[in-house]
Amino acid sequence: MAGYTLTARSKQGYDDTVARVRELLADAGFGVLTEIDLKATLKAKLDVDVTPQVILGACRPQLAHQALAADPSVAALLPCNVVVRGDGDGAVVEAFDPQVMISMADASEAVRQVAEDARERLLGVIARVEDGS
């Protein structure tokens, strides 16, 4: 686990884990705004083969609105990126830790509260991936 991510391992295969993470994000109130298929992109652009990996740009509109109202520059830190990467028979799920994002800036108390809410929601997703629930 990197010091800037929240990480879980899934015993499910890559495709099943991607689908499950989407469900868990929705359950936590996040929508997926963007999706980058790194395997397909790197194959198309560089003709290299890499492990299946997708970046899901997750956003909870209420939190984004609160953060932007407190500090419009927070837009540069949105959305919350969640990565699912194939790993043998299972998968690894990583989310960029919102607390790390705000530590890079002089964040107001309002922005810190939004980051903590987002972090707690993402930790719930990560925990459910890890325990398979």
Image (spheres, grey):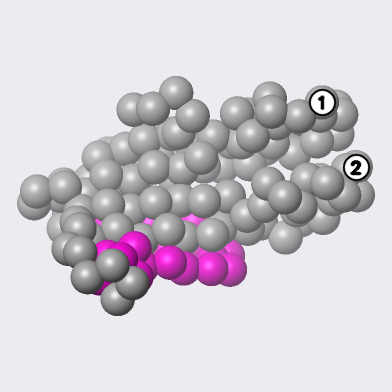
Residue 37 seen in the current view: yes
Q: Is residue 118 left or right of residue 42?
A: right
Q: Is residue 2 left or right of residue 102?
A: left
For image coordinates 8% across by 51% down, the residue present is 89
Q: Residue 12 at what x, y percent from top left?
A: 17, 54
Q: Earlier in the sequence, mark 1 or mark 2?
A: 2
Rendered image quadrant of residue 118: top right
The residue pinned by badge 1 equals 106
Q: Count residues near mark 1 (Cα–Cα under 10 Å), then give few for <14, some for 14-19, many for 20+.
A: few
Q: Which residues are magenta?
A: 17-43
Q: Secondary structure at mark 2?
A: helix
Amino acid type for the residue under numbered disc 2: Ala
Q: Residue at x 43, y 66 (%)?
A: 36
Q: Name the residue beneath numbered marker 2.
A: 70
Q: Residue at x 27, y 44 (%)?
A: 92
What's the amino acid at mark 1? Answer: Asp
Residue neighbourhood size for the residue with mark 2, other residues' Cα within 10 Å, grouped as few (<14), some (14–19), many (≥20)? some
Task: Check residue 40 for magenta coloring.
Answer: yes
User: Residue 56: percent from the left, percent from the top?
Assistant: 47, 60
Circles 1, 2 touching at the beta carbon (< 8 Å): no
- In the rendered image, is residue 29 in sight? no
